[in-house]
Image (cartoon, helix red, strand yellow):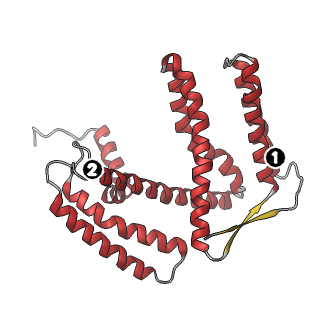
Amino acid sequence: MANERPISTDQKGKTLLYILELPLYLPRRLTIPLVSQEKWCKPFAVLSITLDPLLFALIWGFNTKNPQILIYAIGGSSIGIALGILAFYTTHRLSPPRKYLFLWLALGFLMSIIWTYILAQELISLMVSIGLILGLNHSILGLTVLAWGNSLGDLVSNVTVAKNGGPDGVQLAIFGCYAGPIFNTLVGLGLSLTFSTWAKYPDSCAIQVEDSVYETIGFLIVGLLWALVILPQRKMRLDRFVGSGLLAIYSCFLSSKIARNLGLVQFHMSPSYFMLHGG
């Protein structure tokens, strides 16, 4: 028709991108409830609270390799249907719930963590496959692609806060640099080891500790000591000397790990084991 406008290239690109993202977006949209006023949709909310117990049961069954996974699925479906019926009769079509808003927010937070776990598992499997195809050690991919990608968001946010945060921006950025890894190490390892020992109980969970672990911890201690010793000596002023030292330590660490993985440098220590007991 004469009045019809041709579809622009930009619109075609957005449509193609939407189609490509749909298989990844739709499962998350169906399981993560959004309770903001702008994004509230009662059918999606009821469907998400119905599917969440089933998804959690399937993940738990597959991870524990339990032969009774069908029982898990039936139990999760039953709980989900009950919660879905309850949500259908206690929520409004045009506005999100107000009375039990905290429970909805907690559920959304929990499902976001579960999807992060699922995507992390797939990312690790993809990296291992790429390493096998290219003949690379998966440790190199973990030290470069995974580590940089995992830290890029923190790097951008900390630099932005340091530049635009006013007089306290640098202090906030430093807190972010150290508080994030502390949380990942203590809470991340704590929860992981707790669930691992719980899943294997009453058997023990053996963790092989190789020399590379001691090497990594050694460089971490050197970096912490550098900041702990040099900063007070320079009256807590962050300058190029402090930053250059930290970058030099990281460069030595990365070069050492890559050289070892490529076989350019070799030294060996007897691996040891930590036995973790659940209960």
- The x, y position of residue 75, in whole percent, is 36, 77
SS at mark 1? helix
Q: Which residue is mark 2?
A: 101
Depicted 271 relative to depicted 74: above or below: above
- The x, y position of residue 130, in whole percent, is 62, 57
From the viewer's side, name the closer residue of 114 and 82.
82
Name the residue at 48% across, 74% down: 61
SS at mark 2? helix
Closer mark to the observer between disc 2 and disc 1 = 2
Q: Which residue is mark 1?
A: 259
| Quadrant in which the C terminus appears | bottom right
Mark 2 vs mark 1, CA separation in Å: 53 Å
- The x, y position of residue 76, in whole percent, is 36, 73
Name the residue at 34% across, 55% down: 32
Whether residues under marks 2 and 1 lie with C-beta atoms below 8 angstroms apart, the answer is: no
Q: Amino acid at mark 1?
A: Ala
The local crowd at label 2, few if under 14, some if 14 to 19, many if 20 or more residues have their Cα within 10 Å, is few
The reply, left or right, for residue 163 in relation to residue 133 is left
Choose the circle earlier in sequence order: 2 or 1. Answer: 2
Name the residue at 76% across, 19% down: 233
Depicted 270 relative to depicted 77: above or below: above
Name the residue at 81% across, 43% down: 256
